[in-house]
Amino acid sequence: MSDDPMRPVPRAWADDPALDDGGLDDWTAAGASPGAAGAGAGTAAPRLPRDAADARAPWPGPSRAARPLGANLVRTGLALVVAFAVLAAGAGWWQVVDAQWLSTRPDNPSVVAAARRTLRGPIVDRNGSWLARSVRDQNGEALRQYRDPSISSVVGYASLLYGTSGLERTYNAQLLGLATGDPLSGLAGKLFPSASGVLGLQLSLDLRLQRAAVAGLGSDKGAVVMMDPTTGQILALASTPTFNASAIADPSTATTTMTALQADKGLPLLPRATLGQYVPGSVLKIVTAIAGLDSGAITPGTTYPQQPGAEATGLLVDGFRIKDGHHPQTDGTALDLIGATEVSCNIWYALTGLAIGGARFVEEAAKLGFGQPIPFDLPTSASRLTNGDGPAPGGFMDDAELASAAFGQGETVVTPLQMALVASTVADDGLLMRPQLVTALTGSAPGAGTVAPQTWRRVMSAQDAAAIKAAMEQAVEGSLGRLFTTGAAVPGIPTAGKSGTAQLGGTGEPNSWFIGFAPVDHPKVAIAVVVEHGGRGGERAAPLAGSLLKQYFALYGAS
Amino acid sequence: MSAIARVRPAPRRIPNIRPRMRRVELGLLLVVAAALVVGGASLGATERWLRAQATGEAITAFGFAPPDPRGLGAYILGLLAVHAAFVLAGRRTDQILLPAIGMLGGIGLLLMQRLPQSLVTQSFGTLELGLGELQLVWLLISLAVLALLALLVRSDRWLRAYKYTWAAAGILLLAMTFVFGTDVNGARLTLSIGPISGQPSELLKVILVVFLAAYLSENRPLLAEESMRLGPLRLPPIPYLAPMVAMWAIALGVVVVQRDLGAALLFFAVFLALLFVATGRVSYVVGGMVLFLAGSWVLYQVFAHVQVRVDNWLDPFRDPLGQGFQTVQALYAFGRGGLLGVGLGAGLPTIAGHLPVPAVHTDYPLAALGEELGLTGLLAIFGLYLVIVERGLRIAAAAQDEFRALLAAGLSLVIGVQAFIIAAGNLKLIPLTGITLPFISYGGSSLLANAIAAGLLLALSDAGAVPPPPPRARRWRRRSREERA
């Protein structure tokens, strides 16, 4: 015990006069004598033994200088302990909390090295057909191959030169085996290392439908989204023009391919289904109907007395004239929800929009996913009713803009994925499922497993959904509706839908839209189609949707 | 006043040198040695495995030998030799400091042996030494210096009486570096005299602590009194304020002249800490910080290199391949480490054959250690620094007078604060400043300066020679007990 230099020592030893002779020749002159940190003894300053300070002090009263240093030392030590605790917290932040983010960043040398060395996990469709796979080239480096260009906007590419896009980007860490999951399972992985951490992806996509959609769009630019409304699983997510992802992944052709693609005015690298923002035209009326019914602003039987009279000359809102083209067919009848949807009545929907009000309209649309990028396996653009800088409620400029938005013109833009979700919500009795592309992470590494479908939220009651379903069925199967949605109906299977003709301003052809689902009583598939400059909805989008629905039922059956 | 103390003559020489067991130190040193041997074995196994992976050859014998077993052995023997010297000298100095420092030095040695040896090379005739060997040489020299200081320093007169001489020497050193120094990485830190080159600012920090301890202990009464009020601030009398303002000017001068942000920050932080220890006034510390921040702001506006450092700190990912490269790569290294680290020797993937963090052996050893030893290893290292500081402050608290108390506090704080500044810079808590991680970073100046500080600390902790032998009766009783056992 006497080894401890911190042992308390009788005060008297510290007061040994030997300390007083102006500098200490021998640091241990007093024998073993620690203990008097507060006792001043120096060449110039008067010495101040702790217990005698007041008596000897040349200044009156208790003084700071007479206080021992001990307390200050403790406080300084504590300050340093706090400082090092901050260091520990900082290290914990980078090494635990932020580690996953840091370790999967594309310019992290370990990611770069892994990309060069590792065979990325395979990507397959819902039937196990391969979409992307990796092989070794003659130098032993990993080379990525893609099945065909139809999936390019979904799967993307993985290139040593140009990084990654699409699902290859979203799931880069998993495909490369870099994702260790949470710190604890990473710890377990350290103790029981598995051969490879590489995971593969199984998609809900059906390659046959995907190819059919791309073939159907042909040389037009556009997008198709097909999904299962009850699970949110995406069956087809087509965007044209496509590109050859294998040529980007191959280092020998990457540069020329990429340069050409980037210069292409058709923007083949833009995944239109998820990032394309289109004026929706009349397909947006379904959003207006949902908002109207759910907010209670309208009922399925709502009619507007001023509507029939305004058909001939147009409805004047804030000096803006809203016109319709269907009055030769309806001939002065006051339309309700079903009638207005069948003939796509702009005036009825404009009045509905005004009845809902800007703020409520934006709020209801947000329940469908408007206003925010949709959480998805791929990056998405936000759909919006208005650009939101106006003074009226909801950010509309005035009632004219609100009325226009209600039938899909004005400042309204949407993504094809968002419109597929709208159709899917109606089909699924008002329940909105989270859209899902990856259904399983395959492989033996930690993190493998299926990804269950998730309910996003209930948008409206089943009763409201049934009313809109009936209206959308009438729009496809009804005698007048058929004129607007030519070719959308699948023979033998009741089909519901809504076409859209999105006026773009200027002299160009409008964008051709269709959204719908089938069969009406127990929907199995929902669809959204947009063809840029495809003309009226019934001309291009509706027939394409009909043919794709037919192919779906040929593959999967109607029941 | 005890009568006994008066009567007993004050011995000026150690009456009798008797060897004295230091069981705590020996036990801890054995733990340190075991940890280092395990570390060396792990490093050797990993390196062999990686080599086999790269060349494709089979691992015939799974060797666990450290990559440089003689180097590691020499270092451990060096530690034990210092311990033996302490035992033989029979002084009652602190027993915790040497193992703590030894562990940090050993971690540094393993790291330097593990990094590419060509990072630093030096030839002595036909003898070419790489990074690990140079670090070993400096470590052994530093251990010798530490032991010599701990054992031979008996008087503080040479320190306290010539404080202005020391200060002048420090400023001279600074001036010489400015005039004759060479620029490395935009900072003028290195002074070469003949074949020997070093960074004077490392030595300067020890000199500074000596000067401050002497100045503050002498003027403590006056500095602690309230005699001037300036708004909410209480200031000491003007004449006593002057040296402090001079200190502030010197600290910022170091930045301007040497472009050495780290040293300036260290000097000023230690200065403020000691000022607080001496006076107990928080207002001085706050005032000093405000002054420093104001000065830093001006420097930020004026000097491009300061702006670069601060901007990199704020957002290194803005330019991850250019200005922010090193910072970002260090963060990646921390991230790869995780909780337990990737293991000694298994970290630091190279980019096209180059180390991602070029200054890993001097400025960023913590990033390499964080990657290979993980958060656990970093916490252990932080703990070791805190142990050193805690021992130093204890020595200060037990010191016989204010000069020694302030000296001990200053010497331990200079180590602790320096470790904090560079660690916080590595971890992106503050802008990076290029100073070394005490006892771990590569570099002779740094190791020597810290060894001097530690050696002085040990000397200050000396509780004297062995007290007079215990009474015969007790001794006899103990001996008989031992015989029975």
Image (cartoon, rainbow, N blue to C red):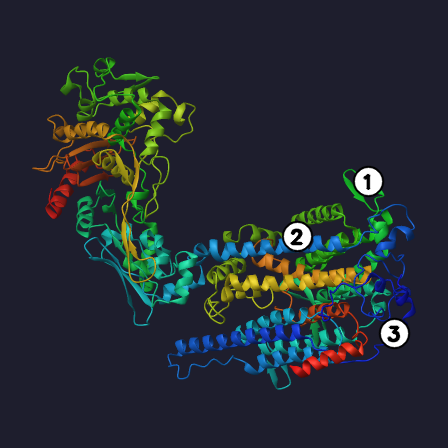
What kind of residue is marked 1?
Arg
In the rendered image, the residue lying farthest to the left is: A492
- Look at the numbered disc 1 and give the secondary structure of its residue: strand
Q: Which residue is mark 3?
A: B11
Mark in front: 2 vs 3: 3
Q: Which residue is mark 2?
A: B303
Q: Which mark is residue B229?
A: 1
Residue drawn 82% across the image and 40% down it: B229
> Which chain letter goes with mark 3?
B
Q: Which mark is residue A19?
A: none
In the image: residue A358, left or right of residue A214: right
State the separation of the CA atoms marked 2 and 3.
57 Å
Whichever of labels 2 and 3 marks the residue nearer the N terminus, that label is: 3
Q: Nearer the viewer, residue B195 or B284?
A: B284
Quarter of the picture containing the C terminus of chain A is: top left
Q: How many numbered circles are shown?
A: 3
State the separation of the CA atoms marked 1 and 2.
34 Å
In the image: residue A349, left or right of residue B421: left
Give residue A122's quadrant in the image: bottom left
> Which chain letter goes with mark 1?
B
Q: Nearer the viewer, residue B66 or B175?
A: B66
Quarter of the picture containing the N terminus of chain A is: bottom right
Residue drawn 61% across the image and 71% down it: B103
What kind of residue is marked 3?
Pro
Where in the figure is residue B47, as x and y percent of width and height?
46, 76
Mark 2 burial class by Cα count in 10 Å: few <14, some 14-19, many 20+: few
Whichever of labels 1 and 3 marks the residue nearer the N terminus, that label is: 3
Q: Is residue B195 above or below residue B457?
A: below
In the rendered image, the residue lying farthest to the bottom is: B126
- Look at the numbered disc 3 and give the secondary structure of its residue: loop
